[in-house]
Image (cartoon, rainbow, N blue to C red):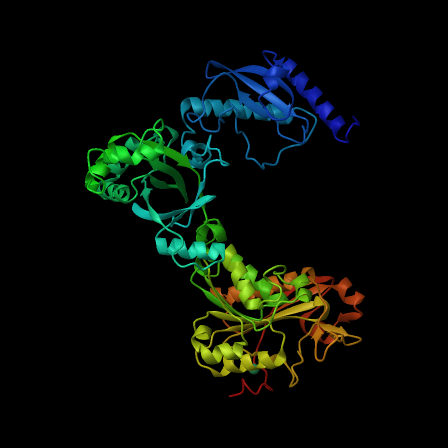
Amino acid sequence: MPDWPLAAWHRKAVAALAAYIQNHTPPGRELSSSELGRSSSPSRGWRISTEVNGQSFELDIIVDLHFPFSLPSIFLVGQDRFLSWPHVEQSGKLCLLPEHAGFEISTDVRLIDHLVQNARDLIRQCLDGSNRADLATEVISYWGAGLNDAKVKRFWSILKPVGPTRSIAYWEGQRFVLLAETAEKGRTWLEHFKGEFTGSRFSFSSGIFLWLPAPLYPEQYPANNTFLREIAKKLGQHSVDVLVKVIKSSQEGFPVVFGFDVGQDSVLAGAWSLPLNHSIPHHNARSSLTRGFRSGKIPPAVIARRYLASPGVLEKRRVQRCDRAWIHARGGDAKAARHVHKRIMLIGCGALGSQIAELLAQGGVGRLVLVDHDTLSWDNVGRHILGGPGQVGTNKAEAIGKELQQRFPELDIVAAGRRWQDVYQQKEQLFRECDVIVSTTGDWASEAALNLLARRSPHFPPVVFGWSEAYACAGHAVAVLDMGGCLTCGMDGLGTFQHSPISWSVTPIPQREPGCGGFFQPFGSIATNPINAMIASTALDVLEGTIARSHHRLWVGSSEALTSHGAQWSEAWIARYGEIGTGERVYRLAWPVQEHCPLCQK
Ligand SMILES: [Zn+2]
């Protein structure tokens, strides 16, 4: 087999490690291949013994074929400390560094020595109990240990990860179990997710969410329904009542979610409660709950008592959060949490508009109103977020609406496949309810009309006009607010922008489609990406209130791109704002009222 380029590093590092083992006090020994069998792609391993707090421990140091470009693994030998000591895996492997930790790549043994010291420190902390809280903070690793993800359906949760204890709704599908606050919320989510509106096809039953005042430690993990009953009792009569109610309505088993705070975060751990012992097939469950009574005649209270009197089964399940707060900010971004209640209208769902819609949906904006009368065609696909079956040949706004709704089932997405002027005449309210309107139609007449509306209608939302210049050499976002200039302030009477940073030696003529009046600007998605991001972030800044008066954001592309298109930076622009240099940056500029503007002069 040919020696691969990094093999020399591996040999040198392994030789240094072997020497380190020999020099260790007492000297270690190399592991046999049968002893190495347990690790996935082992190369070599050694065993050393070391003393901590007067006790002797044996550690295996194992490296794989990638070493020193992979971390050596250190195992605690001959002791079953899984779930009683933190950072010890079932195999005995010690978690000494985070998974993606940076570490020194070298062929000497400083890293090994450092890891052995870390292992000794970890054992010392485990012996004196000073790191015990880690068993609670890393609950997700311990809770899910031993679960076969391929066989056990996960819980997908759109629950609010906060107390109090309450009954919840669940739907069981082929691949997952959805947990929601109510059947109605769950059904809406499923209809969005599956992209089909089927009314009441999804049937929901009841489960329970138990909110615990303190984290669960592994020795407290509930193993059966007796524990479930004990936990509910400890939480108080309300929790017992909720549990009994859930059992009465879901007698053949139901999902249980335990929620609790760990530091700043809340954690959800799931389980499936079944009424009988594992050894008895589940289909008998009901008969043993109802024995001695004629069908339908058993009092629900008896069922609940029998359910909780037998230990039954509580199978652990992983909970995958897919609630809005988690998806858009992984539970942490305060900005995204505020966007949940905000509404943005996008007029124009083309090259710029579609990408901006996607960015805003990812940013967690609660409601998106998408407006475009145009149909998606194959020549749009290169710079649009959509394409392919079911999308080409359909209305752009409606197709994006469907796509984003499936990807973000908790967002409220409204699609109007008409001209905005028609939407405004039929449903003016849709405009007024928005916090910001973003227009990327690039159509002067349309934007002039929208600008006029924004200037003349009381309580009209702020409008952000966004566009790209030819070849995406520069892009603009002009936010028009009550204070400051309007779009017309920056235009001449024919809609030519007066503040371009580019001067063209030959004015670029839009490329012509073989048809009357069909023109388009040639630019690709990569070139416009920074412009889309700038327009989206301008809209979010207006939402956030960080932009309080009209404002101009300008992206300039690279000077090389500019010169390759036979253009240069405008001398007038430079005289006013300074050298652009190599470009590729965003300017934030004032957008004052201009004296010539017929709309701003009262
Ligand atoms: Zn104006």
- How many numbered marks appear? 0
The x, y position of residue 144, in whole percent, is: 45, 34
The x, y position of residue 470, in whole percent, is: 71, 71
**In what quadrant of the picture does the N terminus appear?**
top right
* Residue depicted at x 56% and y 79%: 486
Residue located farthest toward the top when viewing the structure as drawn: 26
**Left or right, residue 25 beside residue 18:** left
Q: Residue 442's image quarter?
A: bottom right
**Residue 585 seen in this snapshot:** no
**Left or right, residue 357 beside residue 178:** right
* Depth order, front residue of 105/438: 438
**Left or right, residue 81 beside residue 260:** right
* Depth order, front residue of 214/586: 214
* Depth order, front residue of 575/154: 154
Q: Residue 288's image quarter?
A: top left
The x, y position of residue 308, in whole percent, is: 25, 34
* Residue depicted at x 34% and y 35%: 283
**Left or right, residue 552 beside residue 250:** right
Quadrant for ligand 1 reads bottom right
Q: Is residue 564 above or below residue 157?
A: below
The x, y position of residue 277, in whole percent, is: 33, 29
Q: Is residue 25 above or below residue 590?
A: above
Residue located farthest toward the front when viewing the structure as drawn: 294
* Residue depicted at x 53% and y 73%: 463
Q: Residue 271's image quarter?
A: top left
* Depth order, front residue of 151/109: 151
**Residue 434 seen in this snapshot:** yes
